Amino acid sequence: MVHHWEIQDWQGVGELSVIIVGEWVGGFSRAIGATTSVQAKLRALKDGLELAIDLGILNLEIEMDSLVAVELANSITTPNIFLSAIVTDCRSLMERFELCSLKHIFREANGCADLLAKAGYAQSPDFLSFSNAPTYLLEALAFDVSNATRFRLISS
């Protein structure tokens, strides 16, 4: 079984992840303060990988809405010395899975993580773990599992 996971951050002041397998497996949010979007995504990736390892997940499919973070983690080299430590940590964690893929998706396809990000934007504890899906997330979770289509508006 391949576990599916989405990552989202909210304006670079927090990050949230959710692990989904057609049903809720686990999730978390972390307030990290002011940072870059890419750094927040990489921190979310690291936290999510650690959570998946703790849950005993062996096969993992990760979707992120940051193309830059995906390319950094999937690349052989790390061109940015500022991000090299966290990118190296993520790569090392990804190697601990039997199967682990990381791909880019558009934000519109990241509904659960987006709702978690909005709810966790101003959270006071630095880290919250969710063993059950929060009630405000149930509708979006059902939509994500349904594989229904969302439209993306692109300005020309």
Image (cartoon, grey):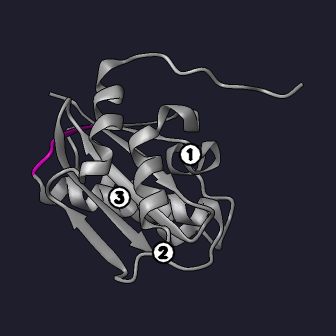
Residue 148, placed above or below residue 109: above
In what quadrant of the picture does the N terminus appear?
top left
- The residue under label 1 is 75
Q: Amino acid at mark 2?
A: Ala
Q: Is residue 57 magenta?
A: yes
120 or 76: nearer the viewer: 120
Q: Amino acid at mark 3?
A: Ser
Can see residue 98? yes
The mark nearer the N terminus, 3 or 2, is 3
- The residue under label 3 is 92
What mark, if any, has residue 122 been given in the picture? Answer: 2
65 or 123: nearer the viewer: 123
Residue depicted at x 39% and y 71%: 30
Left or right position of 58 against 40: left
Residue 34, placed above or below residue 52: below
Residue depicted at x 42% and y 66%: 120
Marks 3 and 1: in contact by CB < 8 Å? no
Crowdedness near tag 2: few (<14), some (14–19) or many (≥20) residues, C-alpha within 10 Å: few
Which one is in front in this view, the residue at disc 2 or the one at disc 1?
2
x%, y% of residue 35? 62, 74
Residue 110, placed above or below residue 91: above
The mark nearer the N terminus, 1 or 3, is 1
Residue depicted at x 12% and y 54%: 55
Can see residue 100? no
x%, y% of residue 89? 40, 65
Q: Quadrant of residue 78?
A: bottom right
Crowdedness near tag 1: few (<14), some (14–19) or many (≥20) residues, C-alpha within 10 Å: few
Q: Which residue sits furthest left?
A: 56
